[in-house]
Structure formats: structure tokens, C-alpha cells
Image: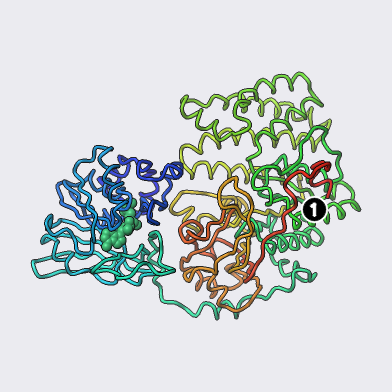
Amino acid sequence: MATAQLVRRGVSDPRVLGAMRQVPRESFVRPDMTEFAYEDSPLPIAEGQTISQPYIVALMIEAAKIKPGDRVLDVGTGSGYAAAVLSRITGKVFSIERHKALADAARTTLAQLGYDNVEVRHGDGTLGWPDASPFDAILVAAGGPEVPEVLRKQLKVGGRLIIPIGKMAGVQELVRVVRDAHDHFHEEDLGPVTFVPLIGAKGWSEAPVDGAPSFERVWPKKARAPRQPLPDLIRQTAEPLPDLDDRAFGSLFDRFTKSRVVLLGEATHGTSEFYRARAKITQHLIEHHGFNIVAVEADWPDAAAIDRYVRHKSVHVGSGPAFRRFPMWMWRNVEVANFVDWLRARNAALHPDQHAGFFGLDIYNMNGSIHAVLNYLDRFDAEAAHVARQRYGCLTPWQRDPATYGRAALSTGYAKCEKPVLLALGELLAKQLEYESQDRDGFLDAVQNARLIASAERYYRAMYYGSAESWNLRDTHMFETLTHLLDWRGRGAKAVVWAHNSHIGNAAATDMGEARGEINIGQLCREQFGLDAALIGFGTDRGTVAAASDWDGPMEIKRVRPAHADSYERLCGDSGVPRFLLDLRERAKPELREALSTGRLERAIGVIYRPETELASHYFDARLPEQFDGYVWFEETRAITPLPTEPQAGVPDTYPFGL
Ligand code: SAM
């Protein structure tokens, strides 16, 4: 477990941190979940239950003030993970689980790991474990309506009971009960949480109802602040947006155009309204405010095909069709195609110096980038092409599936290809003047591809060390690509960025930054450009979205669940205004900013959407007014319209040129 994350979230007991480091969480998760074992999130196990999030396990153990030698009762064994962590600190752990299959599996896992101070029993934990009592501590990993009297009675004097208490669905309170004397107890509230229901004789008597959570969550303490009539405030402050086809749509965003970089987000990767709104705003910024770079969350070599099309450049011989990698619908869709055609038509009437270009910031198409660099050098410098071929040859075995390079680099213990790819980049840069004099745009394309390969090489290695590092490498690469584009365009360069809210909102105002140490393009732009960057988020309540169920899976049109009761989206939905812009800047609406500054949930749907685990997999904590300068709301939205992804018989795949 990346204990640095736990420390950042306030866990400080060295015994707890040591035990978390010691227990191999991958032994407690399903084989298909192994790669996520070291993420700080709950994961599904059998019987519709979950293995706890490491942070919750650490938080509860720390709250119980467990000492070596303690006798501890763990109610809700689940996978046995929390019991295992407890067993590394205490003398003896008694763990009880109401699902027999889970109790049996946990017993086997704990025995295989040699943790012989844990006893697992199948039974109703609301009744405790009378024959093993009294206990120094009792930890209950499921939420009940009240503190069961029998559990209090099974505490030693001085013993601590940690239990979530409250409604079956929604927010509960984590409570610590301390037995001060034989017949005296005191209780403390430790903060708002959401846990799965505690089902049993002294818990909830029924099977979980619809809407009961299937995993746990710790809420920021601020979430308990008294509720303001926020939907009313939003209704009063929101500026209703006209229809997307109305020319006035873009002019509402004039207030942000003093910024050199305008970043436009999206709350999903498959919502038509988000794509169309970004296109409308971007058209307005290009036509009326001199923006000349559109930089999107797409791979550089693929976006370069669109750039050549919109800037009326010749197609590279031998370059394959663009956007053939998962998730194809993200850029192969009618909404993007319409924008691309508009940009091409607009550029046609202008001098090339006034053309606006279309560029990719992302790093996933390493294969395409290698081809592009070699293709470029083949045209201009055969000798250098020969050397670069050898250098990139190092990556050849992994080109089809670069993720396996990271695993190989990890197991061999060194980054075999790091040096060659950096040398190849250095050699290109060393001849910048010579190459640029022959083809300035061609050089930009080649050098960005070489940078992408160098970043991707690091990225695939970092993937195996932890998610924050690889995320940070990717977003830093995207930010640097943006600054290279601004430099290349020179004086008067102005960029619009299209990327997911999670990339363009300031990560420092979300638990991405606060809990996981992740940075993003929005944060880097804020730090580098200050108010010269405008960060604009997008959100929706319900409708349909294009997304897959698994990575590399087929695109599906999925129904978006109405937003969670504790989310910003719910507040916006309750305002009753179907489509609006909220200006969140300090000088614009101070009272709105203040009211919205208490942390809340925000939804992020990426290329994968799993409505069944939505709260765990798609919501994060954020402070909206610090995250964005503006927020665009569409109450109900629909999925994008994808273009055909399968090659059609007899028709060459020429996207975007054959549109
Ligand atoms: N801490 C566990 C782990 O790390 O894998 C996960 C706990 S899971 C969130 C909660 C567990 O409590 C579920 O496995 C559920 O079946 C169990 N549970 C609910 N009510 C119970 C009861 N009355 N007695 C025992 N277990 C119960």
C-alpha cells in the first residue's frame, strides 16, 4: 500500500502504517482485480461485498488505538484484509462474517499467509463473540441503526468500539464508544462515513434495500456543514444558456477570452452536448478572439492527421488511419467531424499564418509516433533515420502492447529503452535549425512525436509503481505539449484545450490532489499562467452516455443515473434551470463561491462507466469554485453519435479525410 497517501490523509500511527505496508493486499482481492490492489479504493469481492479501502482500515484501527497484545473483535470479515492488518499489530483477532463463503475464503487466505493469530467464524457479529469476550477493541465494518448493547458489554473497561451509526443508505456517523468504567461509557463522533449495512439481530433486520451502499466511504468533515438553500442561490446566479445552435451561445464566454489559454472540460467522454458546446465556444473564440490552437486529449500522431486536413496540408504517404485505438468513439464521432469540417472550411479562406490548428496532447499512441519520426527522418535525413531506427528498435518487442514494457522493465530492474529514446529526441533537437529551415511544421510534428515516445517510455514504467506517478507524468506531458505549441505559434498564440474535467479542473481543489498527490493540466496552467488561464468545467444530471464497461470493451450507450444527493450535480439539478453557465470567479460572484466552497461530491465518467458501482468508481470530493472559473450545466444529455469503427468492405479508412 502506498502509505504516503495514508499519511497525507492524516494517518500517523507508525504501527498502523507498518502493518499496512506488511500485508499483501493483492492476496485478498479477486484475480481480475490484482492490478488495482494497491489503489486506495474498495474493490468487489464475492457475495456482492467489498474489500475495504485501505484508508478506512487504517482510520478505524487508528481510531481504536490498538496496542500490541490487545484482543480485538472484527465484525464483518469480508475478504479478511482488515483482520490481517489488525493481526500484525495485536495479540489476537476474532473476526466474524455473516456470509459463510466469505468467512471460509478469508480463513484460507489468512492461513496461507501464516497469520495464525486470527480466528474466523461464520455468524451474526451484532451479537459479538461472547465466549472470546471481553475485548480491548471492537471494530465494526458495517453500519447499524444504533450501537448494539451486547457489543458495549463485550468491551473491557478502557475498551474501544468503533462503529458507523445512522441511516441504512446515505451518510452515517463513525462513532467511538469508550468503556470508562464498568457501567459508564462515553461516545465521540469521528466524522461522516458511508458503510454497507450491518444485517443481524441487533442491526438492520432486512436484506439491503435498493440504494443501500455496497462499499464504504469516508466523507470530509466539512460535508456536515448545515445545508444552505443552494439550489435557490444557483437559480438566482446562473446565466441561462441559449440553444446550442443559437449564435449567442458562444458570446456568453467572452468574459474568459482575455486569458491566453481557455480550458474546456467534460464530465464524460461520450456526451453530445459537451462536444457540441465546446465546439460552439471554440468557434466563437477562433472567429472573434484570435484563438489559433485547439489542443485536445487525443494522441499527437492521430490528431496530426486532423491538423493536416484542417490546415490543408498534404497527407503523409504511409500514415495509417487515425484514431484506431480504444476508445475510438472519443474522436471518431459526428460531433467532432462537424467541428473539423467547420475548421477546414474556415481556414480555406485564410492565409496559412492565420490558420487555427488541431493538436493532440496525449501519449498513448507510441507506435504511431515512432512511425511518424522515422517517416520524417526518411524524408529529410536518411543517415539520422538509420540511427533513430536502431534506437527505437529497443521498443519494437513492446510496440503492440507497450504496457508490457513497464512490466518487463520492472522485472529486469532497469529501464532498457530510456537512454535510446532520449538520445533520439536529443539528436532531433540538436538539428532543429537545419530541419526547421526545410519544413517548420514537419519539425514540430517530428519533435513532438519524439517527446511523446520519451514520455510514454517513462509512463509505461511508472504504471507499475503507482497510479499517481503515471498520472502525473501523463498530465505533465500534456501541459508541456501545450506550452511547446504556444511557443511554436509565437506572439499572439492563444489556445483552447478540450479534455476531461479531471484534467482541466485544478486538481489541488479535489481529492485527486489532496489525497492522492495527483497534479493535472488545469493545476499546472493555473500555476504557470495564473488568471491568463480560464478553467471551465461541464456537468450533467442524467441522460445517456457513450462508454464501455471495461477497458478495450465495445462502446455501449448507457443510461446515466440521476446525480447523487450529496453532489454538486444534484444542487445544479435542483436549481430547475435546464442549461446554464455559472461564473465562479472570485470577482464575479463572491457569495456563490463561498456557498459552494464546502466540499461535495462530483461525478467523473471516463471511457468506462459502471453505473452499478457509481459512488465508488465515479465520484470524488471537490471544491467546485476553486476547481473551475466557470461551470457549464446541462440537466439532461445524450450520447455522442459515433462514426463507424469497423472498416467497411471496399471503402478505405481515411478518417478524417473521407468525411
Ligand atoms: N473489512 C473487510 C475487508 O477488508 O475485506 C470488508 C468489510 S465489508 C465492507 C463489510 C462486511 O460486513 C461484509 O462482508 C458483510 O457481509 C459483513 N456483515 C454485515 N453485517 C454483518 C453481521 N451482522 N455480522 C457479520 N458480518 C456482517
* Closer to us: 5 or 588: 5
Q: Measured from the top left, where is residue 655 in percent x and y?
A: 79, 45
* Closer to us: 543 or 243: 543
> Quarter holding the N terminus?
top left
Q: Measured from the top left, where is residue 83 in percent x and y?
A: 26, 49
Answer with the quarter of the image where residue 422 lies. top right
Where 374 falls versus 504 (above or below)?
above
Answer with the quarter of the image where residue 128 lies. bottom left
Where 36 falls versus 376 (above or below)?
below
Q: Residue at x 36, y 62 (%)?
A: 196
* Closer to us: 33 or 208: 208
> What is the image's colouring?
rainbow
Ligand 1 found in image quarter: bottom left
Q: Is residue 318 left or right of residue 552?
A: right
Given the image, on which type of amino acid does mark 1 rest? Val
Q: Measured from the top left, where is residue 613 in percent x and y?
A: 48, 59
Q: Is residue 58 visible?
A: no
Q: Is residue 657 left or right of residue 276?
A: right
Q: Measured from the top left, where is residue 264 in percent x and y?
A: 66, 58
Where 10 falls versus 309 (above or below)?
below
Q: How many circles with numbers are drawn on the protein? A: 1
* Closer to us: 468 or 481: 468
Which residue in the structure is indicated by mark 1? 340
- Tag 1's secondary structure? helix
User: In this view, which residue lies farthest toward the left?
Assistant: 182
Q: Residue at x 51, y 28 (%)?
A: 408
Q: Is residue 230 visible?
A: yes
User: In this view, which residue lies farthest toward the right?
Assistant: 349
Q: Residue at x 48, y 45 (%)?
A: 468
Q: Residue at x 69, y 22 (%)?
A: 389
Q: Is residue 201 left or right of residue 264?
A: left
Q: Residues within 10 Å of mark 1 (few under 14, many from 20)?
A: many
